[in-house]
Image (spheres, rainbow, N blue to C red):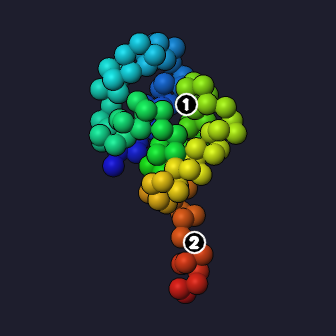
């Protein structure tokens, strides 16, 4: 998984007007500039906030991407919940640290 590259793409997209314009006109071309897995690329191109969350994208970066895609705040929050239901626990990044915490404590 290339969480750094995925996060970098979204960070650039959130801050750079030229990247935003390219994303709107030729989204595939924008993603080609980053080393992404097929799953990551598809999640970006499909605006799949739930999968991006499960892949480990930080919420501070992800919320700006969701807004860029026209996803309202309540829908953004629900998309993250739905992502965990559909794709399983968060796989990497900061949020993965809280996944299964109750199981680890119980197993001590």
Q: Residue 47, position in %: x, y?
A: 48, 33
Closer-to-camera residue (108/55): 55
Visible residue check, residue 40: yes
Which disc number belongs to residue 101? 2
Point out the tag, 2 or 1, that comes first from the N-terminus.
Answer: 1
Which quadrant is home to the C terminus? bottom right
Identity of the residue drawn at 30% across and 36% down? 35
Secondary structure of the residue carrying tag 1 is helix
Q: Above or below — where is 77 with respect to 12? A: below
Q: Does 10 appear above or below 86?
A: above
Residue drawn at point x = 47 percent, y = 12 percent = 21
Does residue 25 sit above or below 3 in this rendering? above
Quarter of the image where one finds residue 40: top left
* Position of residue 61 measured from the top left corner of the image (x, y, whole percent): 56, 36
Residue at image location 41% in from the left, 38% down from the top = 43
**89 or 3: nearer the viewer:** 89
Residue 33, numbered circle: none
Question: Could you tell me which secondary element the residue under label 2 belongs to?
Answer: helix
Residue indicated by mark 1? 65
């Amino acid at each position: 998984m290339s969480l750094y590259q995925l996060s970098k793409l979204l960070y650039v997209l959130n801050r750079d007007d030229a990247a935003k314009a390219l994303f709107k006109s030729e989204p595939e071309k924008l993603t080609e500039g980053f080393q992404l897995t097929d799953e990551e690329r598809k999640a970006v191109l499909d605006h799949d906030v739930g999968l991006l969350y499960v892949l480990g994208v930080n919420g501070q970066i992800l919320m700006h991407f969701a807004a860029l895609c026209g996803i309202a705040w309540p829908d953004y929050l629900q998309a993250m919940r739905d992502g965990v239901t559909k794709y399983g626990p968060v796989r990497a990044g900061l949020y993965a640290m809280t996944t299964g915490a109750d199981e680890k404590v119980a197993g001590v």
